[in-house]
Image (tube, helix red, strand yellow):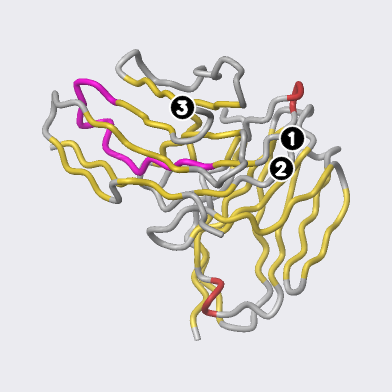
Amino acid sequence: QKEVEQDPGPLSVPEGAIVSLNCTYSNSAFQYFMWYRQYSRKGPELLMYTYSSGNKEDGRFTAQVDKSSKYISLFIRDSQPSDSATYLCAMSGAGGSYIPTFGRGTSLIVHP
Amino acid sequence: GAGVSQSPSNKVTEKGKDVELRCDPISGHTALYWYRQSLGQGLEFLIYFQGNSAPDKSGLPSDRFSAERTGGSVSTLTIQRTQQEDSAVYLCASSLGRVAADTQYFGPGTRLTVL
């Protein structure tokens, strides 16, 4: 079992839909939870970061962390074709480590 | 300001040859990471540099892989005697390195193809 599990998709949705992306993890010591967006042939860019459990909202994006269930989510409201990308979850801070563990990424396609 | 840059953007080599991949981090960033991304896979950690500390090499897949960081800035990842399974995108990232949550800024990657 990988330390971070993420469904690779692809996930195809119509424009305007609410998108839910998820990751599960096994190491309860993770403290920092991140979502990266990666466009084709580009490097990942940080989208959102959350410390410990709870919700964080930024515009159309909401990140949720449930440490009791070892489950994190990213919600995208009013999805746009420009949101089409691969979304990678990442976690760090276990044992003070600065090295994040990444999920495989979920490919999202938002069609007009 | 300039972001993380990597060169070359693409590299095609023959099996058994050595390759060098370069990363120029953001100025002032003390932490530098190398990752490998194979088709359909997540980011696989390779090596981590933090300031003047000894690098964390725990992710290097074999002794054919090595990396150095000169003057706390530019880093070079070297793969000796390349194999076809080394074909992947090699990504470099840098961060301020103050805390584990510091944002990592990624370069565009080097796409390595081993024939």
Circle 3 sits on which residue? B69
The image quarter in which residue B63 lies: top left
| N-terminal label among 3 and 1 | 3
Q: Residue at x 41, y 62 (%)?
A: A40
Q: In terms of depth relative to the viewer, which is nearer, B102 or B1?
A: B1
Circle 2 sits on which residue? B102
Residue type at the position of mark 2: Asp
Looking at the rendering, the stretch of residues picked out in magenta corresponds to: B79-93
Q: Is residue B91 covered in magenta?
A: yes
Label total for image: 3
Label 2 in the same subunit as label 3 = yes
The image quarter in which residue A62 lies: bottom right
Q: Residue at x 86, y 38 (%)?
A: A68
Label 3 in the same subunit as label 1 = yes
Q: In terms of depth relative to the viewer, which is nearer, A63 or B113?
A: B113
Residue B98, which numbered label? 1
Q: Is residue B11 covered in magenta?
A: no
